[in-house]
Image (spheres, rainbow, N blue to C red):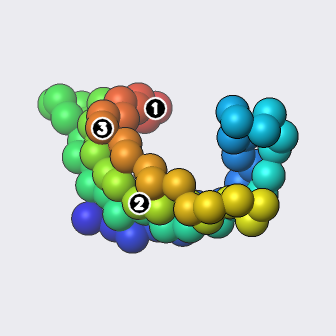
Amino acid sequence: MALKPRFGSFRIYDDHEQSLGAGFELGYASPLGTSRHISIGVGAGATHVFTGDGLPVLRLVNLGWAF
């Protein structure tokens, strides 16, 4: 389990402009397989866009490959 900050540029489709935002995400990732090169993760959090409201963030499934 990890609590991670998140920040970056976000595009809101209602006003078609990019805005800066910051927030947090609570997530879990687990390596899979005998060589542990595949990772699967889930998480949720919230991001505040500085020119608008807060946005809920839900990461249902995140697949990754490590080399």
Q: How far apart are marks 3 and 1 (CA)?
A: 23 Å
Mark-to-mark CA distance, 2 and 3? 11 Å
Question: What secondary structure is found at the residue carrying circle 3?
Answer: strand
Q: How far apart are marks 1 and 2 (CA)?
A: 28 Å
Residue occupying image coordinates x 78% and y 38%: 15
Foreground residue among 7 and 1: 7
Judged left or right of residue 10, residue 42 is left
The label nearer to you, 3 versus 1, is 3
- Disc marking residue 36: none
Q: What residue is disc 2 on?
A: 45
User: Residue 24: percent from the left, percent from the top?
Assistant: 49, 67
Residue at label 1?
A: 67
Q: How crowded is mark 1: few (under 14 residues within 10 Å), some or many (20 or more)?
A: few
Q: How crowded is mark 2: few (under 14 residues within 10 Å), some or many (20 or more)?
A: some
Q: What residue is at 69 percent from the left and 33 percent from the top?
A: 13
12, 61: nearer the viewer:
12
Question: How far across and how far down the image is residue 47, in percent?
Answer: 55, 61
The part of the image, by quadrant, that contains residue 65 is top left
**For the residue carrying disc 3, how many other residues have a C-alpha within 10 Å: few (<14), some (14-19), or many (20+)?**
few
- Image quarter where the N terminus lies is bottom left
Amino acid on which the number 1 mark rests in the picture: Phe
Query: Which residue type carries mark 3?
Result: Leu
Q: Name the residue under label 3.
A: 60
Report which quarter residue 27 is drawn in. bottom left
Q: In the rendered image of this protein, does residue 21 appear above or below residue 33?
A: below
Residue placed at 20% from the left, 35% from the top?
32
Farthest-out residue, front: 14
Above-or-below relation of 42 to 56: above
Query: Which element type, helix, strand or loop, lies under badge 1?
Result: loop
Residue 39 in view:
no
